[in-house]
Image (cartoon, rainbow, N blue to C red):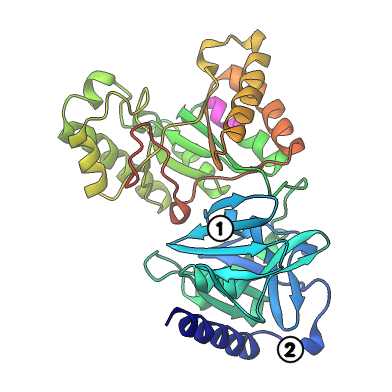
Amino acid sequence: MMKFKYLLLCILFFVLTLFSLPTSSQATNTSNRYIALHDRLLAFEKEEVRLENAQIMVPFEKMARYLYADIQKSDEQITITKNATSISYNFVTSETTINQEIIPGYSMKIIDDILYIPVRLLGESTGFKVDYLSDILTVRLYTDHYPHMSHPQFIQKLKKQRKEIPLPKPTTPVDPGKPIVYLTFDDGPNRFTSEHLNIMKKFNVKGTFFFVGNQIASYKSLTQLTYKEGHTLALHSMTHDRNKVYASAPAFINEMKQEAEMIHSLTGFKPTLVRTPYGSKPYVTSAMRGLLKQEGYKLWDWDVDTLDWQVNEANFQQIITRVKTGVEKARQAKDQHIVILLHDRVQTTKALPGIISWLQQQGYSIQPYRAEMHVPQNFWHDPEL
């Protein structure tokens, strides 16, 4: 039964590819096509998206990281798992398997020493819908259970962006074998937030900002600018007052809901990611975690604590050193999504260029948090948060 199921899957992929993608007579080594996930364009270099035998192909491991799939590698095989589906490639036999069933005649391919997979095969096997939008030469992956624009709205948005700014590209080569790194900033908005935005713009990277509600009132324009420039806004409570935030479960959730409404009124975006003051453990009780789930929030702590708040401005190099040590330790522990804790403070402003430079030189991909690609990252190890 399983073999029959995957035979049908292969036939379906072939038919969909034949009718939705350009014909092989148009094929070139590079496709001049783009890949989108829900409402955002993914950062692939021009030569990374290939058109081979009427199939648009993407680097297997890099695309798997964009989908937040689990990745397991050995000398003989690589396997990614997403939504209970495992896709493997055996470097010895050159066989592609889905849930241990061989996919004949529709395998992955090594091109210029990089393993490629048909984007439709990867997307549809892991539960995404995959459509080719010929107007903008873009393959779009999306799911119905996550809010997203209609195709016409997305096409209009992308055409407008292409007139205003160049298509997104990594500023430096990214090593697909390394984890994704998230630069997260607590305790803004303030004057250092503005400095951090300027620095990140120069390096062409985006971050995640956990703002405090009471400070947003004094920095409304800066809050709007942070969102407009493509960074992710997240919740750090209204007051940042330990006694108020953790007074009770209702008080706790109201702090988050009130701030979320404030940000929504300013930007049209309603954050769902929470980082609680002083970290979630031991302060966030079972009842509080239950309310977070009930209200649709997610909870992030961190992997690398830079302790930047302890460092004076003159010793900012200590922050850079802690980032290097912490990131390498997390990588060696096989962490595929490394969250770095920073704060909107002067010493962090001094350290930030050095942090980003080192991460880019080492080939790490720096990404903002995206709700559609959530990965659990909390001290309680709660997979539902």
Q: Give the residue at x 22% y 23%.
A: 244
Please give the label number shown on residue 23.
2
Q: Mark 1 points at which residue?
A: 80
108 or 189: nearer the eye? 108
Tell me the quarter of the image containing the C terminus.
top left
Q: Can residue 49 be seen from the camera position used here? A: yes
SS at mark 1 in the image: strand
Query: Which residue shows up at 59% across the image and 45% down it?
Result: 367
Q: Which amino acid does label 1 sit on?
A: Ile
Q: What's the residue type where badge 2 is placed?
A: Thr
* Front-most of residues 267 and 250: 250
Select label 1 or label 2 by which is in front. 1
Sequence-wise, the earlier of marks 1 and 2 is: 2
Q: In which quarter of the image is the N terminus?
A: bottom left
Tell me if mark 1 has few (under 14), some (14-19) or many (20+) residues whose alpha carbon lies within 10 angstroms of its own: many
Label 2 sits on a secondary structure element that is: loop
In the image, residue 319 above or below residue 42: above
Q: Residues within 10 Å of mark 2 (few under 14, many from 20)?
A: some
